[in-house]
Image (cartoon, coloured by chain):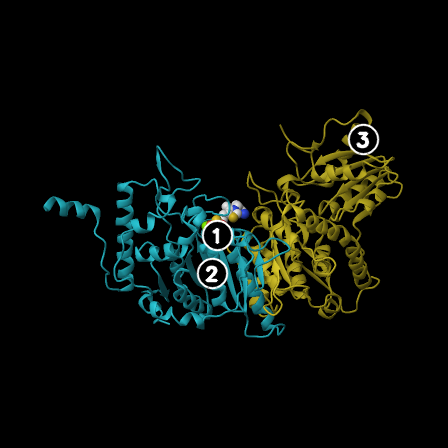
Chain colours: A cyan, B yellow
Amino acid sequence: MDKFGFAQSQKFDTYASRLLPREEYFTSGHRSCQGCGEALAVRWVCKAIGKDAIIAHATGCMEIVSSGMPQTSWMHPWIHVAFENTAAVAAGIETGLKILARKGKIPEPLPAVVAMGGDGGTSDIGLQALSGALERGHNFTYVCWDNEAYMNTGIQRSSSTPYGAMTTTSPPGKRSIGQATWKKNMVAIAVAHGIPYVATASPSYVFDLYFKVRKAIETPGPAYIHVLSVCPTGWRSATDLSVRLGRLAVETGVFPLYEVVNGRYRLTVQPPKLRPVIDYLKPQGRFRHLRKPELDLIQRQTLAAYELLLAKCQAPYPEFPVLSHEEETIAEGA
Amino acid sequence: MSGQPASARRVGMEVSIAVSYAVQMARAEAIAAYPITPQTHIVEHLSSLVANGELEAEFINVESEHSALSACIGMSAAGARTYTATSAQGLALMHEILFITSGMRFPIVMTVANRALSAPLSIWNDHSDIMAARDIGWIQVFVKNGQEAYDHTLMAFKIAEHPEVLLPTIVNLDGFILSHVVEALEFLSQEDVDAFLPPYQPKYRLDPKKPVTMGAFAMPEIYTEVKYAHQVALSNSYGHILRVWDEWAGLTGRHYRPVESYLTEDARILFLTMGSLTEVAEVAVEEMRAQGLPVGLLSLRLWRPFPFDALREAVKGAELLIVCDRALSAGGPGGPVHSEVRNCLYPLETKPATVNYIIGLGGRDVPPKAFHDILARARQEAESGPTGEFFLYGVRG
Ligand SMILES: Cc1ncc(C[n+]2csc(CCOP(=O)(O)OP(=O)(O)O)c2C)c(N)n1
Ligand code: SF4
Ligand SMILES: [Mg+2]
């Protein structure tokens, strides 16, 4: 699995895609927006999960676009209960299966249990239920679709919205630069529960995502996967740029791809050179109002966070972009 | 006692423990609960039954009541016989999920050890918790003593899981007043319970071999129809409830009715109570009868589905109905039970006048004397006209 890193995936692109499952478990006909990165992520995660699984889904875009009575896009047995309790529902399913198997009422091996929810349903309102389920050690995988806001209700900020981003409840104005807080580190929170498997993933890196999901499913105990899901509607980005933006998030170091196995960090995609964050921010209308000081701040924070992550991963440093104050110093010196 | 099975045994124990044994004898498979006084003894005892291998079940120690009911939904959707219990703040925290449980038709059984809602915080009994959850679409029963708590817990599973019912069911028992008293009661043998309550056969469950989508959302074109189906199922559950109760009577000799009557023959004045207040009222009504007063007692056992016809029948011939509520709908018409009872009787051409007394809030003791006071005052009101929408009995200041 290790070989499916960044550089290698370039080679695999040509033929390995044929080895991935052709079955569709998240079927077409759902109502997501054009270019929805979240729907793309769902499609690939469902392929990786495989047929023998049960899904519990939180309220949010992916639930709403896919399950209008009497239709469904889900080929898996699937349940939606509410916004903030998906981890508890999944915990219940896992426990229910366990007792039924113990009483000989259903055959083993048991299907995988997967919970899915948006960043709001995960890092805000559903955090308590998730923490409880992770702490209790249920054998399930939780997948967070992180499109960095409450998109289903009309692009309101969440604790996962990045610094400076414009949302309908963090609008830029005379006294506001947009979202004034830094993105909550949900991955670190999951890791802090001491669970066996945690990873970040992106549908722009399908092989990386695919094998992380497989690992999560096969790991006994709780696993958590945090998937960056580009949302052209909320990010004010072109619909044909979704996959590209997912790549830029990784190439700029804004959303590094890594996994944490039994507490040990490992970078799974290692760009040899980080691009400046502006490459990622510029195509997104939600950052349009930002000026140089904020952009610089975002650049510095991104690199600082990346350095910390590299230290945890004991990974070599890539080539960093030149910071603007360094640029100025260079210019002054010249 | 007639119909008493030879294998029944008499035991003396705390009512909470009896309820947990009922859950054990029902062979509940999946329990998720969060502790709150006065529900705690039930779930503590269940925990130990599971820990000792005396109940083959999984017990999830969830981190909140919201998650308790959510996990119960998950376990029920997986196909397991599922139970939980709570009180007051716990029930309030579940509120959102209460509606979803019934809307999705999961036959979960829950004991509510009734307790007052904050603020001010009170761990003591009244019915404000369950009355705030009146419209949750569950079957709801009230019990007056430990025997009834045991009986109705077992029957609740059979009712809830009937393929034509498939509705979650709450057994309400008064916190402390019932939950924490020691009573003599009769247990069925496990064989009799097994014969009465076969294993749960889920109609639908989450199974990769037969995938279904549960919890789809509804657009305006279909929402009303789904709600109507729920309403029809809940009102039709009435017949199934009576059948199960009749079967129980055949098994145990204990007959239950949606509206229970006590000394109502020729009664011109009726009290109406729910839960443990009923036994206190029975004492008071006996005393009143001894004084030659034409007083009787009704108690509402079945709260949902509301027993309209049975209540209309039960009040026939009475001139005055004194409805005793254990909750206050502040700024509203008084007690929730009274407002429903009045609603039920309104279409009748001949009907008793009704007055509403709210008693026993937040654990305030209600001795038999209270009913004598209320009777005197109510008769006055009946003569000179009611003094208000309701009367808060015993309030100072
Ligand atoms: C208790 C509760 N509060 C609020 C809502 C309204 N609500 C539904 S979805 C949603 C936002 C979902 O955001 P997220 O979890 O990030 O998923 P996304 O739609 O962005 O994929 C909100 C606020 C709700 N359904 N339930
Ligand atoms: S709002 Fe965003 S996440 Fe939601 S369906 Fe549209 S593109 Fe996808
Ligand atoms: Mg979101």
Determine if the C-beta at disc 3 is less than 8 A from ligand 1.
no
Q: Chain of mark 2?
A: A
In the image, residue A200 above or below residue B332? below
Q: Which residue has dot 3 on it?
A: B379
Q: Nearer the viewer, residue B386 or A28?
A: A28
Q: Is residue B337 left or right of residue A148?
A: right
Q: Is residue A68 above or below residue A219?
A: above
Give the number of the disc on residue A34.
1
User: Is label 3 on the same chain as label 1?
Assistant: no
**Residue A126 seen in this snapshot:** no
Ligand 2 has an atom within 8 Å of the beta carbon of the residue at disc 1:
yes
Report helix, strand or loop for mark 3: helix
> Within 10 Å of the Cα at label 3, are there few (<14), some (14-19), or many (20+) other Cα atoms?
some
Of all residues, the one furthest to the top in this rendering is: B384
Q: Chain of mark 1?
A: A
Q: Are marks 3 and 2 in contact (CB under 8 Å)?
A: no
Q: Residue at x 80, y 31 (%)?
A: B379
Secondary structure at badge 2 equals strand
In this view of the protein, which residue sits in the foreground, B45 or B70? Answer: B70
Residue A38 location (% of width, % of height): 46, 55
Of all residues shown, which one is farthest toward the left? A334
Identify the residue at image location x=66%, y=37%.
Answer: B328
Q: Chain of mark 3?
A: B
Q: Which sits in the foreground, B167 or B279?
A: B167
Q: Is residue A225 left or right of residue B120?
A: left
Residue A77's spot in the image, x, y percent? Answer: 58, 64
What's the residue type where badge 2 is placed?
Tyr
Q: Which mark is residue A142?
A: 2
Residue A292's x, y, as percent? 26, 41
Q: Amino acid at mark 3?
A: Arg
Q: Secondary structure at mark 1?
A: loop
